[in-house]
Structures are given as structure tokens and as C-alpha cells.
Image (cartoon, rainbow, N blue to C red):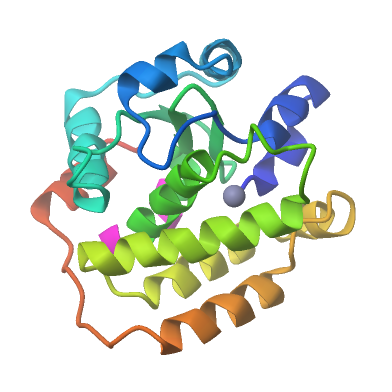
Amino acid sequence: MNYSLIKLPLFHFSVCLALTACGSSSPTSVSLQSSHHYASGVQTIESFDQRYGLINSTVVDKYFGELLVRLDPVNKGGGYKVKIVRTEQPIAWSPGGGFICLSTGLIKNLQSESEIAFVLAHEVAHYELNHLGKKNEASVDSFERDADALGLKKISAAGYTPASALSSILRMHTLDTAAVKLATNVHHYPSIQERLRSLSVLIKQIPSQLGIQDRREFQKMRQMMQ
Ligand SMILES: [Zn+2]
């Protein structure tokens, strides 16, 4: 979900297309930091910090740390580092080195912890599937579909409502229609309809579950996005 990147300078776009880091299916913080994509991840974070500013909050850090552990309890969250960028543009981006950038605009628009969990799980999936390492081997289209599928699997296993994958994508769509059109037409991202269709087929195969309700921490975290 890197639609907003098309509004950023070309430098950002080229880094963003690369998407993620090298690593095994269960990367650790050590392997993420030693990855040769770590430097580009750091560079992207610094660029975002200079351009928009980052949220500096222990409440936010704790929230996303716990959410990552919920998505991957075996690897205690996998060592990823979530950075919140102060912009209304809907950013969800894995620039390398285990960093995951989400924007305040995106988080304010998502309406439940389940929806945020899906966006986060989708970005983690880019890392686990080594999309940065494979950037010359496959299309952005297949990266997005595969990250959606693994993201869905992750939130379902963690106990979140599978259908929140659909609602989170729809909210991104309504938030920035022009950017989404450009991403689809120019940069060959799969269309919203295609993503929803593929996810809907997968969701039908998952036993229905009520899903985890929003925790108090979710509201506290959201308050920090103002
Ligand atoms: Zn993506």
C-alpha cells in the first residue's frame, strides 16, 4: 500500500518501490539491521523526518510494539520498527531495514485496531516475502497481491476480523482517489477492485470469527495522531 508515494519526489519513489528488506521468513532485529537494505531504510526515515516530522511517543511505540507481537508471537514481533510520519497523505511503506512507515493521516482514517493490524501485517509480509530482494524478478502487482494474502493470514491467526482487510483497503481508496488511480494506471499497482476480489475469495476460506475488539490502548494511540 504505497499509493501516496507517487506524491513524493522521485527519490522517495525509487526507494519505496523497492519495498522491503532481505531476510528469512522469520527475520530477527539483528538480521534486519545487518541487511544491506538497512541503510536505505534509515535514509528514508531521515527524509520523512526532515520533510514531515515523526511522532515521538512512548504510548505509540508501545502500542505498535504490542501489535507486532500479536501478529507474530513466536518471533516476539519480528524486530520491526514502526515510524509514524506526520502527514495527512495515506502512507504505509516498508523502505528496508525492518522499518515500517505509517502516516498520521492513514491511522486517523482507519476505524479499528483490526484495520490497522491488516495494514501493518501487509507491510510485514513485504519483508517476510523478501520483495526488496526480488524487485527485479516480479511485478509490483504480484507483490501487492501476495502481501495482501499473507497479511490476511496473519491477522486471522492473531484473532482479528478477516473482513477488516477489505474495509482498510476501501478506506485507503476513499482517502486518496487520485493517488490510487495514478498508482494503478502508471505504476501498475493492482486496482482496488482486483485486490478486494482476491481477498474476498481468500476470506471465504477462513472460518468466520467475531474478532478482537478495539482495546483502550487503540484509542489512546489514536489520540496521539492529532
Ligand atoms: Zn504493499
Res. 112 in view: no
Residue farthest to the left, as pictured:
216
Q: Quadrant of residue 212?
A: bottom left
Q: Locate residue 31, reporting x and y percent.
A: 39, 20
Specify whether residue 102 is painted magenta: no
- Residue located at (53% from left, 33% from top): 87
Q: Position of residue 161 (x, y in %)?
A: 29, 74
Residue sitting at x 18%, y 47%: 73
* Residue 5 visible somewhere in the drawing: yes
* Position of residue 13 measured from the top left corner of the image (x, y, whole percent): 75, 31
Q: Residue furthest right?
A: 186
Magenta-drawn segment: 107-114
The vertical placement of 175 against 19, above or below, is below
**Secondary structure mostly taken by the magenta-highlighted segment of the chain:** helix
Q: Say above or below: 180 vs 78.
A: below
Most foreground residue, 211 or 126: 126
Q: Residue at x 30, y 69 (%)?
A: 156
Reply above or below: 131 against 160: above
Q: Is residue 30 left or right of residue 139?
A: left
For the image, the number of numbered tags is 0
Closer to the camera, 76 or 226?
Answer: 76
Q: Residue at x 43, y 59 (%)?
A: 151
The answer to whether residue 173 is left or right of residue 161 is: right
Q: Position of residue 204 (x, y in %)?
A: 43, 89
> Which quadrant holds the C terminus?
top left
Tell me if 193 is positioned left or right of 219 in this view.
right
Of residues 78 and 171, the one drawn nearer to the viewer in this rendering: 78
Q: Is residue 109 magenta?
A: yes
- On screen, residue 80 versus residue 52, left or right, reads left
Q: Extreme front residue here?
A: 24
